Image: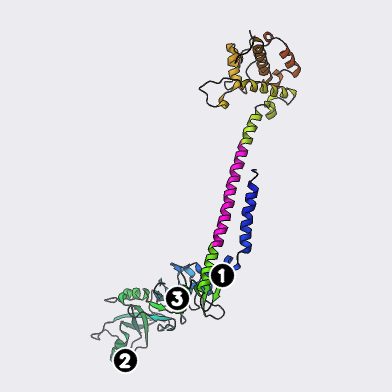
Amino acid sequence: MHPHVFPTITLSLMIVTITLIHCPTYLLAVNERYLICEAPFNCGDLMDLSYPFWGSKRPNYCGHPSFQLDCSNKIPRINITYMNYRVLKVFHSTRILKVAASARTDYFDFFCPAAFVNTSIDNNLFSYITSLDTNLTLYYNCRTPLADLPNLDFYQFNCSINRSTMFINYYTQSSQTFLAISNLTGPCNYWVNVPVLQSAVPTPATYDAITATIDSGFMLGWNASNSECDTCLKAGGLCGSDPTTSSFACHCTNGTSASGCSTVSTRLSSKLREIVIAGIAAALLGIIVVCIIICCLRREELSKALIFRREQLRYIAPEVFSRNFGGVSHKSDVYSYGMLVLEMVGGRKNFDNGVSNRSEIYFPDWIYKDLELGMGGTYGVMTAEEQETRRKMILVSLWCIQTNPSDRPSMNKVIEMLEGTLHSLKIPPKPFLLSPKGSPVDSSTTS
């Protein structure tokens, strides 16, 4: 391992540790409620919802107590004065539901309900958008069919409830139409006002058209402590509520307050938070860089170790790796000696210009080639005695590296061969395991 690596890692870890220890709690949790409420949430097909809504996995302190959304079955619903509405759209910028559009669940896809209840809203929280909404009045169980009444815009259809048939009529302007129908036919048993969009009122009216109109919902504006929320947002906080008192609460980076965030503390907290995050990021980046350096150094060391190992394997006899070549014996040391001598001779080889990599030269092959040409490794300026000694060493070494251990001479025999004359030595066969060509050369007597 590189000597400077460990101090660098230690320094980086110390920076991260000190930063985390001395980092204020509110910067790490940064007011846990602030962090949780900061992220918008989805409910059914409604995306990026925020205050005053809450529900699903979003806690109640992130929204207004009266704006809980039921997200089950991927159909967003909201309860307004004990009546469920489908939430079709939410316009946060204008604080309007399409209510927001929403549609009463008891009239959705059908307007012959089991109970006849007028639409009612909490006027402290919601308000109709008069420029967009109108009332569709449904009359149930009227005493006389209205088919013969002139100058009235209505649509008559039947509703079967408990196996009894009732005549049902509707009109888009409830007050005047109801008086007209009551004066001409007597009062109907039931009537229900259902808000709809003015733009969705069908002309002419049919059962399917009325159903589609009711299903399209209507618009509602909301007032969930809007002024307090605006003040909170301007100060850098997030609107929410206090679960204990159900009152408005402003979640700031440094805590939760009913009166809003301090602009100075909010800016300071944000600045400190940025500094801490930048410090942690820098320390982590330093650790990553150090890890990359370590990997590179380890890779380099491993590469060197592999090269060294490959070089060492050159001197190990084949029977050490496989018993197919015989058992390990003192002849294995003879093999190592022969390879060492040939390696020394190979270091003086004048390689062909066509070979760019020394590892591509298989030296027993070129030694055999030189022996056949009568060169025998006689390179450079040498005396006749030196040339004879070198040639003798090569021949003895080639006998030492024979693949079959029984073909190798003992060390005593090696000494005798070196002490003997060159003319008494024969050229040994090529070791078939090491020779790329795999064809042994016939033994011959040197001249």
Which label is found at residue 230?
3
- Residue designated by label 2: 186
Regarding mark 3 in the picture, which secondary structure is present there? helix
- 417 or 70, nearer to the observer: 417
- Disc 1 crowd rating (10 Å Cα; few below 14, some 14-19, many 20+) is some
Q: Is residue 411 magenta?
A: no
Q: Is residue 279 a member of the stretch shown in magenta?
A: yes
Of 159 and 281, nearer the camera is 281
x 58%, y 45%: residue? 293
Quadrant showing the C terminus: top right
Q: Earlier in the sequence, mark 3 or mark 1?
A: 1
Up-down: is 358 above or below 118? Answer: above
Q: Nearer the viewer, residue 394 or 210?
A: 394
- Where residue 441 sits, quadrant-wise, is top right
For the magenta stretch, what is the residue range? 275-303
- Residue type at the position of mark 3: Asp
Vertical side of 8 occupied by 212: above or below: below
Residue 107 in the image: x percent, y percent?
Answer: 40, 77
Magenta segment, prevailing SS (helix, strand or loop):
helix
